[in-house]
Image (cartoon, grey):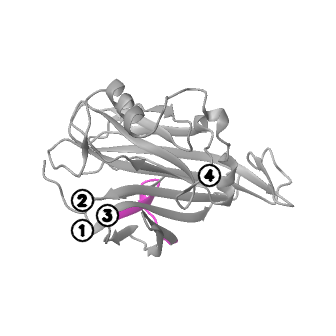
């Protein structure tokens, strides 16, 4: 089933307050949530999880930004260091508003003006230098000439939301530094899904991929690989929320002020038991 929500951001915010335990959306709650941005050097990443809503063109759409490791929340990153935006069905860029909840997640919203598949995206891109005794400093080789190693950490998080009744499942190939996006997704139990992993728009392989199912009974994890064509095929067997996390490291160019580029791409999606005809 899905929830049909009233149109407009004010109605959406009130619906969240009434039905999702959000007492008040405030702008000063982030101070109460621990800053775990720098834990990305140990494997922290973000993921975007949609709510169980159905939308029409003109509605405000919503997703939830989470931060932690393997779908286990742990604080939040410094949001001002992330590039967060949404892409429409034709590739138009839509501004995104972040609304704090007082919990370890942030609600992201954007407005819509047509039917089709929208993509929420988040990108993190910064350098960290490693020193002895597990000491890390933010910055490039130019700022850290004595570091053991300097890496550029690049992450992207995507979540697709269908708007309207058109049945158009085409997903815009968003120009991200790394991306893991579906191809005409139909998120239904038993339906084979296809995803493509890319680096700067080109297919990317990796043997470090994990598919996490987060259900009522707890998490289930499956390790998979992605070949040189960048394609991953997966058939969900249960309804619920899934997150695919792809990690890989590439050498930097000799002229770059860092030695390695450590990539992480996540795509989170919700699978239904049956395809609902509206």
- Along the viewing direction, whichever of 27 and 120 lies nearer the viewer: 27
Q: CA distance from mark 3 to mark 2?
A: 13 Å
In terms of secondary structure, where does tag 4 sit? loop
Residues at marks 3 and 2 touching, judged by CB atoms closer than 8 Å = no
Residues at marks 1 and 3 touching, judged by CB atoms closer than 8 Å = no
- Along the viewing direction, whichever of 27 and 168 lies nearer the viewer: 27
Please tell me whether the stretch drawn in magenta is mainly helix, strand or loop. strand
Magenta region, residue range: 195-207
Q: Quadrant of residue 115?
A: top left
Total number of numbered discs in the rendering: 4
Q: Residues within 10 Å of mark 4 (few under 14, many from 20)?
A: many
Which callout, 1 or 3, points to the residue nearer the camera? Answer: 3
> Looking at the image, which residue is at 37% across and 68% down?
231
Residue assigned mark 4: 74
Q: Please state if 167 lies on the left or on the right of 22 as rendered.
A: left
Residue assigned mark 1: 191
In terms of secondary structure, where does tag 3 sit? loop
Residue assigned mark 2: 186
Q: Which label was assigned to residue 239?
A: 3
- Along the viewing direction, whichever of 198 and 247 lies nearer the viewer: 247
Q: Residues within 10 Å of mark 2 (few under 14, many from 20)?
A: some
Q: CA distance from mark 1 to mark 2?
A: 7 Å
Q: Please state if 84 lies on the left or on the right of 27 as rendered.
A: left
């Amino acid at each position: 089933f899905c929830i049909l929500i009233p149109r407009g951001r004010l109605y959406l915010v009130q619906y969240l307050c009434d039905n999702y335990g959000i007492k008040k959306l405030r702008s000063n709650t982030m101070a109460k949530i621990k800053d775990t941005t720098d834990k990305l050097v140990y494997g922290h990443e973000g993921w975007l999880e949609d709510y169980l809503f159905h939308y029409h063109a003109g509605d405000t759409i919503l997703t939830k930004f989470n931060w932690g490791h393997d779908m286990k929340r742990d604080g939040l990153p410094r949001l001002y260091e992330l590039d967060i935006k949404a892409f429409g069905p034709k590739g138009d860029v839509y501004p995104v508003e972040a609304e704090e909840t007082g919990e370890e997640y942030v609600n992201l919203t954007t407005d819509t003006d047509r039917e089709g598949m929208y993509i929420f995206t988040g990108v993190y891109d910064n350098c960290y230098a490693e020193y002895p005794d597990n000491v890390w400093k933010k910055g490039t080789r130019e700022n850290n000439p004595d570091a053991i190693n300097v890496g550029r950490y690049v992450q992207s998080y995507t979540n697709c939301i269908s708007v309207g009744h058109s049945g158009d499942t085409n997903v815009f190939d968003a120009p991200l530094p790394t991306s893991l996006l579906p191809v005409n997704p139909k998120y239904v139990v038993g339906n084979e899904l296809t995803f493509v992993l890319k680096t700067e728009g080109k297919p990317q392989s990796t043997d470090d991929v994990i598919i996490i199912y987060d259900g009522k009974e707890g998490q289930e994890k499956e390790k998979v690989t992605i070949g040189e064509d960048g394609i991953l095929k997966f058939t969900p067997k249960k309804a619920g929320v899934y997150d695919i996390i792809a990690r890989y490291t590439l050498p930097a160019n000799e002229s770059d002020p860092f030695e390695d580029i450590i990539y992480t791409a996540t795509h989170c999606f919700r699978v239904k038991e049956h395809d609902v005809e509206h």
